[in-house]
Image: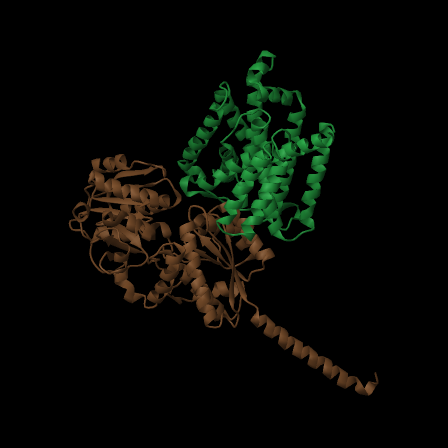
Chain colours: A brown, B green
Amino acid sequence: MSIKYLPCFIGRMLGALLVSLVLSGAALAQQPLRIGFGMSQTGALAGNGKAALISMEIWRDDVNARGGILGRKVEFVQYDDQTNPSTVPGLYTKLLDVDKVDLVVSGYGTAVIAPAMPLMMQRKLVFMSLFGLNVNSKFKYDRYFQIMPAGPDPAVDWTRGFFEAAATLNPKPQSVALVGADAEYPHLALEGAREHVKRLGLKLVYDKTYPPNTVDYSPIVRAIQATNPDLVYLASYPPDSAGMVRAASEVGLKTRMFGGGLVGPQFAALKTQLGPLLNGIINYEAYAPDVGAKFPFLDQFLAKYQARAAKEGVDPLGFYLPPYAYAMMQVLEQAIKGTGGLDQGKLAEYMHKNSFDTFVGKVSFASNGEWAQPRMMTVQYGGIAGNDVAQWKKSGLITVLYPNEYKTGTVRAPYHENRK
Amino acid sequence: MTNRVFAAVAFAVAIAFAAVTQLISNEYYFTAAYTVLQFVILATAWNILGGYTGYVNFGSAAFFAIGAYSSVVLYNAFKAPLPVMIVAGTLIAGLAGLGLGYLTLRLRGVFFAIASLALAVVLYTFVVNWDYVGGARGAYVLQPSEVPFGLPRYVHLLYIAMVLMSALALIVARTIETSTLGRGLAAIRDDELAAECSGVPTLRLKIVSASVSCALMGMAGTTFPYFLSYVEPSSAFNLSYAVNSIAMPLIGGMMSWVGPLIGAVLLGSVQQLVQVTISSAWNLLIVGVLLVAFVTLAPNGIMGWIDLWRRRGRG
């Protein structure tokens, strides 16, 4: 090649390089944004895991219909963690090292969130988690974020609503019975309840736990009744929630307030199974049709969710976990858009500094990754007739007692007179 | 091959497997291998009592949990180093096995099986109500921030520990199998009454067998808290440990140390593979179907089937 053609040759090469760079940039923009997670599709929490997965898929489809995030379509890489914590380290290392996902989020529940934490901390990844109870209390990881509205001190904030509602009773309650299952969540809830008992100066007349596999709950309810408490706070998982509610009805428990921390009645399965037995019971809920106006976009989500849930045989109402699974992804989406990329440090910083508009309202995070303000609602069930699931979509059955911004009524006491 | 040569070969292979940590950077393979090796130890341990002696232990998960929770205690009390946890957990599980064996192995037949199941329930209830180890809420055991021996991640250390422990379990199993103790255990398995009439000290041998078996199960659980960072009773006492530690020797063959190794590697690898390929309820069905197929087509396990095939080949 003659020297006189050299500038032309270099120019062509540079041009080719530029074109290839532009093309590769375009190709990168076209590459899907891959989000990986394990989710329980089998095992004890499969029902909730499936419901959460449906919600996340609805979010993915919504985002992709809008053109994706930063021009990239969203793809999920998802595995079944079998509700077995020992599968989690393997699944998440596969997601990161073999599948090379761009981001990871957690599966459902403390037991499958905690085993992923060491890996997240080693890789310095943002870890958005779904309904973990106080997981970060030991890890103290500054890139951990949690979507359950339990508040910065989950043990105390979780039970606050029941005791705030109790404080409104006239005359003031004097004594309280605390009861719960020998399991992770009830222990945490009872720990928080004891704090409120002290704070309010209540007399603790019963404070016991029972084995989770208890069959007959009547002796427990009778033992509680023998102490004649003004309040009975119960922290339980679905099987024992059902057992205790039935036993309270059969034994004829007489107290001013009963309930507080029952897991199960948030889901359609237990709502329909227990039906009118839930009348008068105080509990926590994430959503009530009466406060639908406070969540203007939630109806659109629930309509999509309920249509899919009916086909796939999971929780047909979707009031509890599904909106939060969607909201978790909304937070992530807004953080990525806000930082303009996937830099984990910037994402974490952005998530700490900003609040996020989601279907479940405005979300902002405390320094430990929990919600800055607790927002789980304390409610009282009433007016339930029969076991029809459709009635729960109407207003009037779930009265919100706390927090005050969502309050739709006051406590109807005593429990035994409102049970009918 | 003498037991000494076998031990040397086993440790040489283990060191070769451990050296892989310097060649492969992908952590996934080590976490998957950790799980498979954990089952190699459990299956080998179960087979010492179940296969060699003929006494079925349904409480494998309980002994695994003893190992795991002794590590939790040592972590909470002293932040003890990993080797101390392994040795202590193994000894404590062995003592529990000795106690269980002493109390129940005087009886024959299914009584030990029932007692082992009962022990699992009793221990589960005990742990659930023991706040020092987290009780029902579970305990967090955080991996140390510094990894020894210049290894890149803590999972590499756990993998190496598991490789060495697997080698040790196989050496113990083979040594028992080829020793006088093993022949005594085989006599008990074939006909306990006849063995006793022939002068075999059946109770003593059964207790030794139970102690060693349970100690090795406990050893498999000692590193579990560091692997998960969070231990709660339902995961430590998970039914899958009891089921797999019986199913793996059944599939591989219960008459020799090779059977549980083959069964654990095969079933453990299939479980790992199926979990990330067919990620739905189908994965449980596939493992179940595999179990039924193996037990039906090869009732003496893969090793039994190979022996049969060899005998037929010889005419």
Q: Of residues B211 and A155, which is closer to you in this image?
A: B211
Q: Is B303 positioned to the left or the right of A174 in the image?
A: right
Q: Is A384 positioned to the left or the right of A191 in the image?
A: left
Q: Position of residue A103 (x, y in %)?
A: 52, 61
Q: Of residues A31 and B140, which is closer to you in this image?
A: A31
* Residue farthest along the front direction in this orientation: B315
Which quadrant would residue A56 be assigned to in this image?
A: bottom left
The relative height of residue A317 versus residue A194 in the rendered view (above or below) is below
Q: Position of residue A296 (x, y in %)?
A: 32, 68
- Viewport quadrant of the N terminus of chain A: bottom right
* Residue farthest along the bottom direction in this orientation: A4
Q: Position of residue A84 (x, y in %)?
A: 48, 46
Which quadrant would residue B221 be assigned to in this image?
A: top right
The relative height of residue A263 versus residue B223 in the rendered view (above or below) is below
For residue B119, say whether it is visible.
yes
- For image coordinates 28% across by 53% down, the residue present is A161
Q: How many labels were placed on the picture?
A: 0
The relative height of residue A154 versus residue B3 in the rendered view (above or below) is below
Q: Of residues B28 and A151, which is closer to you in this image?
A: B28
- For image coordinates 56% across by 45% down, the residue present is B271
For residue A151, say whether it is visible.
no
The relative height of residue A274 versus residue A145 in the rendered view (above or below) is above
Q: Position of residue A359 (x, y in %)?
A: 37, 65
Which quadrant would residue B212 be assigned to in this image?
A: top right
Q: Is A21 positioned to the left or the right of A186 in the image?
A: right
